[in-house]
Image: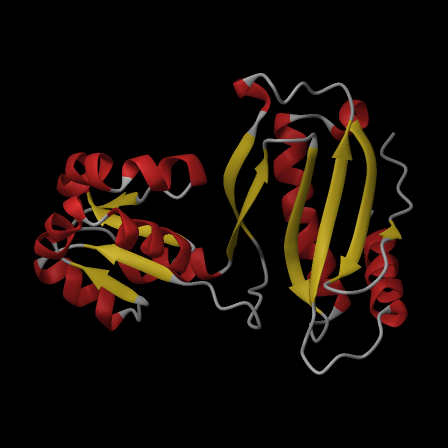
Amino acid sequence: MINALIEAVNIAKNKSKKRNFIQSIELIVTFRGIDVKKPENRIIAKVELPHEIVKRKTRICVIADGDLALKAKDAQADSVISRQDLEKLKEDKKMVKKIANEYDFFLAMADLMPIIGKILGPVLGPRGKMPDPVTSSSDIKKQIETLRKSILIKMRASPQVQCIVGSEDMNSKDVAENIMAVINFIDKRFPLAIHMSNMYIKTTMGPIVKVQTNIR
């Protein structure tokens, strides 16, 4: 499988015209026999990749006070929101949506989760972005480093997953290993030997390349 993925990534890179920016590399997996109208068949989940996509700056927001807020800043969180800041968002739905759009992942003090659920939950929940809780004993630096290497995968409106797994300046083997992480995650939920129709790889503006696999 890994060799087939490396080959497909190389073909996708070679077939893509040079642009004046570094293109992302995307994975597309289509499925059969999965009714996404049923909530239990939908996917919104974080997947940690073995190789960070440096080109894709993953933005992380931490909601915390006190020492935990200081640790988050030291760990280079992109934003730290205090309880006081959170309270101010009660009447500012426009800002809540802006925050939800601006950040990829959220971490939050465990004791703030109830108020976060009320203020941010209606927007973050449907997007699969509800914060992971952290405590004073949590290694927040490690959690942020893990999220930097993570992506959010979704399958909701149609039976397919499409996500960014690398960039064209990355080593093809590293991209292939990132793809394997996504495939292994999906396979635990929906065995690919039964449900996968096809797998494709493409750059942002390049043609689709079918992966020649023997999964089925």
85 above or below 154? Answer: below
Q: How are the colours assigned in the image?
A: secondary structure
| Residue 166 image position (x, y, % from top left) | 66, 63
Residue 61 located left or right of residue 81: right
Q: Residue at x 57, y 39 (%)?
A: 154
Q: Residue at x 46, y 63 (%)?
A: 58
Most extreme residue toward the bottom, as rendered? 20
Residue 93 located left or right of residue 204: left
| Residue 77 image position (x, y, % from top left) | 31, 66
Quadrant of the rendered image containing residue 21: bottom right
Residue 86 located left or right of residue 38: left
| Residue 64 image position (x, y, % from top left) | 16, 54
Q: How many marks?
A: 0
Q: Residue at x 81, y 48 (%)?
A: 200
21 above or below 91? Answer: below
Quadrant in which the C terminus is drawn: top right
Q: Residue at x 71, y 62 (%)?
A: 25
Residue 45 or residue 99, whichever sits in front: 99
70 above or below 131? Answer: below
117 above or below 150? Answer: above
Residue 94 or residue 56, whichever sits in front: 94
| Residue 46 image position (x, y, % from top left) | 49, 44
